[in-house]
Structures are given as C-alpha cells and as structure tokens.
Image: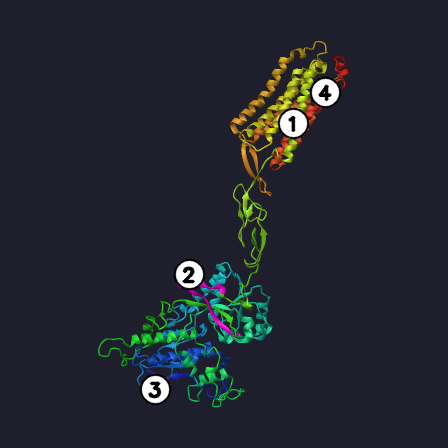
Amino acid sequence: MLENHLLLYKQSNGCVKLADREPLALQVEGDVVIGGLFPLHYVAPKPQISYQSKPQLPPCTGFDQRAFRWMMTMVFAVEEINRNSSLLPGVKLGYHIMDSCDHVHTSLQALLSLVNMNSQSQSFPLCLADSPVPAVIGIASSSPTRAVAQTLGPFNLPLVSYFATCTCLSDKNMYPSFLRTVPSDLFQVRGLVQLVTFLGWLWVGTIGTTDDYSQYGIQAFSNQFTQQGGCVAFHLAIPTTPTAAEIQEMADTLQRSTARVVVVFATEGQLLDLLLELAQRNVTGIQWVASEAWVTASLLTTSRFHPVLEGTLGLSFPAVGIPGLKEFLLNIYPSPKPGMAFVNMFWEEMFGCRLEFKEDQFKENPAPVCTGSEDLKYSNSSFTDVSQVRISYNVFKAVYAIAHALHTLLNCDSEGPNKGICDTHTSFTSRQLLHHLKKVNFTNQFEEKVYFDSNGEPVPLYDIINWQKDSQGIIRFIKVGSYDGSAPLRRQLQIEQSTIVWTKGQSQVPVSQCSAPCSLGSRQVRRPGEPYCCFDCLPCADGQISNQTGSTECTKCPEYYWSDKDKVKCKAGIEEFLSFHDTMGIILVTLTLLGVVMTTTVTAVFHRFRSTPIVKANNSEISFLLLLSLKLCFLCSLLFIGQPSFWTCRLRQAAFGISFVLCLSCLLVKTIVVLLAFQANAPGSRGLKLFGPSQQRILILCTTAPQVFLCAGWLLGAAPFPFKNPNYQATTGKIVVECKEPWPPGFYLVLGYIGLLAFICLLLAFLGRKLPDTFNEAKLITFSMLIFLAVWISFIPAYVSSPGKFTVAVEVFAILASSFGLLLCIFVPKLYIILLQPQRNIKKSITRK
C-alpha cells in the first residue's frame, strides 16, 4: 500500500516540495538491482492538493492477490538465478519492487523512486551499473506502461513488461527501450476474431474502458470483426471511476440487447462494479469472451459471480508449472521487519485478520487480530495454486531474459584464466544492457525458446481458456484449445469444442444473432438504418433458388430448369404444349373430327343428290371444291396439336393459310356467280356467259396462287422451327415448346390476305343480300363472312395475349369456329331442303320470287 503519493503542498513561504515519505517497497540489494512495478492494488486514489503543513494521503485500495503472486515470482526467479552457478556466476542480483496501483500517476511516482534511489549500499559497495536500476520489469496495464516506457525511452533504460499487450507499444520511435514477454494485442485480437467467427457468433457486444489497452483492443477487434461479416451490437466504456447510475445504465443495456455474446477488454478491477451489479440482478445467459487481462483472474471466481461468469471463454498466455514456486510461496510469513509491508498486506487480505504489529495510519481495522496459527499450506486459494501459471511465467521469463543479457554483457562465458566468471570490474550502462537484451536468444528449462523480434515481442502463443465448475463447485480455468499467431492461417486456431462448457452450464453453443439466418429458399434483405446483421428474409423469386442457410442472394436456375416449390433446388422444366392427351387437346381434336365427319357427310349427301336443282345451282363443282377446302381447314388444325416438330412447324401455318384462301376463293366465285346470275335476266346481259366454269376455275387459281407463293417464300426464307420458351409460364416452371417464327410479318401477311378475301366476299355478298330469289345464297355467304370476320378479328388480341400453349389453342379454336361457321351457314340450309323438304328441291321453287 502506498503511504505517500506524488502530492505537492504550498507552504507559507511559497516553496513547493515533495511529500516527506517514500513509497513502500520490497527490496534486496545486489551487484545489479532489477526494478519491478506491480499493480498490488487496483483502485488508485484521486490526487489531492493539500495546503496543510503535513498532508494526509489516502492509500490505494483493492489488494490483488494475483499481482502479489506475480511480484513474488520475480523474487523467486532472482533467488533461483543467484543460486545458479552457470548463470551470472559471481554476480548477485537484487531487486527493488514497488506498487504501481494500476494507475498512470502512481506508476510514474514509483518509477521516479526506483531510478532515483541511493545506488551505494554498505553491503554492496561495488555497483556494476551506472544507474541504480539498469532495467525495470513492469507494468501490467497498457496506459501506465506507455507513460513509464515513454519516460524511460530517452534514457535507453530497458522496460520489460509481463502483461502490457497494447499494439501501440510496438512503436519503436515512441518506446525505443520497451520489450515484453507477452504478445501484442494485434495477435490476441486476431485470435479472438477467429474464435468468435469460428463459433458462428456474428452479433456481439463489446465492453472496454477508457485506457489505451481497451481502446486499441476494441477498435482493432471491431474493425477485423466487421471485415469478417460480424456486427457490433453495442459498445460500453467503463469510466475510470464510474458512478452507480452509469453502472446501472450499462447493466440495463446488457439486459436489453439481443446480443448474447460480449467481448471484454478490461482488467478484473475495472470490471468489478459492473459484474457486482449483474450478479445482484441475477443476469445470466451472457456468453463472456475475455481478453487475457482477466481471463484467469481469480478475483472474479468467487461464488457470487458463478451464475454470471460460468462458461467464460477467452485467450490466455501459455501456462507452465514452475518447479519450486509453490514451496517458495508457502514459506511466506508476515514480519514487522522493514520492507515486509507488502507481505503483511497480503497476509491480512488472505486470512481476513489484523496483524498487531502493523500500524494503520488511515483507519481502524475492524478485523480480528491474527492468531499466529494461520498457514498458507491449508489455504485453498488461487495464490497457492501454481500448477499452471501464466502471467507469473511471463514475469519469470522477463527476469531470466535480463539475466541472460547481463550474462553476455559481463562476458561470463569468456575464455582465458577467468573462464566462467563474470567480469565484475567494469561498469555498464543501461544502453549497453538494452543492446544485449534485444539480442537475447536462449531455451529455458521448459523447452521454450525465449527471444525478442524487431518490435521487442515474443512468439504469439495463446491458450484458449474456459471457466468450468469442478465437482466442489469451484471455478477452474480449463484449456480447451490454442492459438498460434505464427502458424499458417488455417492452422492457427485449434479448439476442442466438445469439451467446452458454455454459459449457464449448457452443452450447446449459445446463439447470438440480431436476425435468425434465413431458411433455405429465401434470402436476406437488410433493414434500412440497421447493421447488416439485422435483416428480413424474403422468398426467392420464381426460377431462383437458395440451398444454403443465410444466403444473401438467390441463384438463378440454368436455362430450361426451374425452381421447385420450396425454392431449394432446380429441376428440369416441364415441357408444355397442346397435347393430344390434354383435356383441351381432346376437346379440340373431337371438334376437328366432328367437323371432318360433318363435311364428309354433307359431301356424300350432295354427291347423292348432285342431279337435283339445289345442288346443281351455282356450279356444283365449286360446291364440292368448297367442301374439300373446308375439310382441309378442319384437318389442318390437327397440325397445331401435339409436340411441335421440324415438319409440323413448317406445315401448320402454310396449310392453314392455303386451305382458308382456297375456301374463300370458292366463296368469292360463288358470290360473283350469284350476282351475275341476277343480272343475266336483264336485257342484253352477257356477264354469266362470260364468267363460265373455266373462268371460275381460273379465278380460284389466281386468288389462291398469291397465298401459295407467300407461304413458299416464307418457309424458304425464314421457316418456323421448334423452340423451348421458358418465359411464358414463369409462375409454374413449365417450358412451352412452340414454333418460333423468325419473321413474324410472314404470319400476319398470310392472315391479312385471308382477311382481304373475306372482306371482298362479305362486300359482294352484302350487295346481293336482297336479290329476289327464294333461295338467296348471297345471304348465306353474308352470314358466314360475318361470323368468319368476327372470329378472326377477335382472334388477334386473344392470340397476342394468350400465354404458352393457349396461343395455339386460340388459333385452333379460331380455325374450327370459322370452319364450322362456313359449313353451317352455307350448307345446312341446303341440306335441310334436300333431306327434310325434298318437295322444294325443284327449279321452280328455287328461282321463284
């Protein structure tokens, strides 16, 4: 405990001087004295300016037994080296250790006390080093370490840290004399990011403090974590001296957040208030991921924190068992002798009693008086559990690194008469020691190679630690994996996931996510204004699939493939066409056959009664040719049904176009003959004689020939061909097999010529609709042409708008409807007279007005 701080007070004469007392220290003199700074307390008092003649200074509080073990490990290592005949023979190491209180101000005060102490001792009149303390081992936290390292840098006085991991300390321009036996946070952050992402946690919160260690660590973690696709749900910064309201607000944030994994860069002392609040609220279910600063902190393993911290996971430095250390620690006893203040503080803290010979200048100690029967051998504490030490091992390595540097510097391995004896007659400077310290390279008794790289740092090795309860309900730090920052990327992280106990004692990896991963068949869509880990899930569009959980994009199926109903896999599209087996196909084929049968029946009846006046009227040859063309019209519809092929695609439109033009040509001739026959009764009329059977045949040939040439040129120049079109049935995944028309104007020219002939027939028939014959065929042709044009005019928009196979069905329906219209309107009235009223089938009855 520090009894004095670097406090100033102003006397009446205006002079300013330091406080009277020097800080407490644990020291042993030697030929070379190594300095040590350890955070024996984790709560430093606020500096107070006093104008009293004798300022009363408050002490540091919160004794840290773990830091005390680090300090005693340094003592143990120094004594072990002094007993070693092969390392620094003839040189006795001493130490001067002070409490840094884990604070910048107190660390600097302790440092100034170290480097300014009296270098001449009566016990050791010969001091090898020019500086009283040529090297310092410390400190734990990064902010105090930066201040001390920056102070020592201009003097080239080595500072070897056992716990300061801030990446900022790698800057050799700012900290030229700084080295450390712990890896930089650069590697720890990489390891933590790999650990978190390996376990599938992409939605985490972070907690830190306002010091350099936390700020640099959290910033580096957040940057690398987001690059790996993760999101930081929140960040809490614990103030240096937090108020109760601030602690409660942070606890509220932890309880409200959906992030169940929290990464913490802080020391146990900085976390204590927050964890006490969480324990009081019984906040459980948070998976803590700890930095090396507190992952092995015994202060947080008491039973009150078990529900909160059980299952904690984090990176720690490799652990070893140092032979003889436990026996050394067990032989520590309090004493009223000078220099034993730290040991006395530890004793009172360990056993909760008060030493009678220890004066407490600041408050009455209410604890009972120590009985003297207390023995560390019977204490079950983390202080005496040194089977696997970590930070203590870093302290151990730091002491040995300095010893090996001194060994080289003092020519302890020189040849000659003084072989094997160190040169103790020549003093050295801190600069010389620093030079040799940077070149240290030895293998210690644990088969570990100890050296410093260009940044003064060791090989980045970490253990992955898990907080697990043993059978007695005590938290143990169990190694469940390792991280080697120097290994290839894929082999850096090694973890035995089955051995991990998670928060609340669970055996399954906790889930921490803002939004649950999208299921198969859907994709993620970010919520506006929120982190990209917060999203909604939308099903994939038709024709796209997502066969992985959490997909951000859907994959389009290859051509002629379609997504299944779950949008998980692509399947071959169902080929669709107007089949003979479809209900619609069966209906259309039935109507076609009915039309063919009816046409054949009419033809047979007309042939049977071909000598009767109603058949002979208006050239029976044209009537039979018209019936033949109607039969072809019916039959051509069959070319549109069934799977399109090379030949059906070429024949269907040509057969349709030529058949209907032939049919309309016959009707045109019939209409002209009717009109000329009426005019033949007029005096001097020769029209009917000039338009005889030969002329009628020529007219039919001339009106049909253009369609034949048009279809022939269309088929030769740009013939339709079978084509699989996946665009029509986008919602069902069916691929329509259709006839692709490379030159669509060809079809519209064919259809347009048919329309032109139909319009001419309608116009001529309309002109002869009122002829005074009893049986006026012009009326029948007029009705048939009206039906014909109505069908084909409505066909065009229906044809354009119908999808897939319905396009073909519309055209077949139009062919059948127009064919039935011509057949029924023109021939059924005549068939009615022939079969049902044969008495009217005479010339007089037909020509009568």
Identify which amino acid the numbered label 1 is placed on.
Answer: Leu
Q: CA distance from mark 3 to mark 1?
A: 128 Å
Q: Secondary structure at mark 3?
A: loop
Q: Residue furthest left?
A: 417
Identify which amino acid the numbered label 2 is placed on.
Answer: Arg
Q: Residue furthest bottom?
A: 357
In this rendered view, identify the residue nearer to me: 506 or 398: 506
Callouts 1 and 4 close, C-beta under 8 Å? no
Label 3 sits on residue = 121
Q: Which mark is residue 593?
A: 1
Q: Position of residue 440 (x, y in %)?
A: 33, 71
Lower position in the chain sequence, tag 2 or tag 3: 3
Q: Which mark is residue 831?
A: 4
For the record, the magenta segment spans: 473-498
Q: CA distance from mark 1 to mark 4?
A: 20 Å
Callouts 1 and 2 close, C-beta under 8 Å? no
Q: Position of residue 703 (x, y in %)?
A: 61, 20
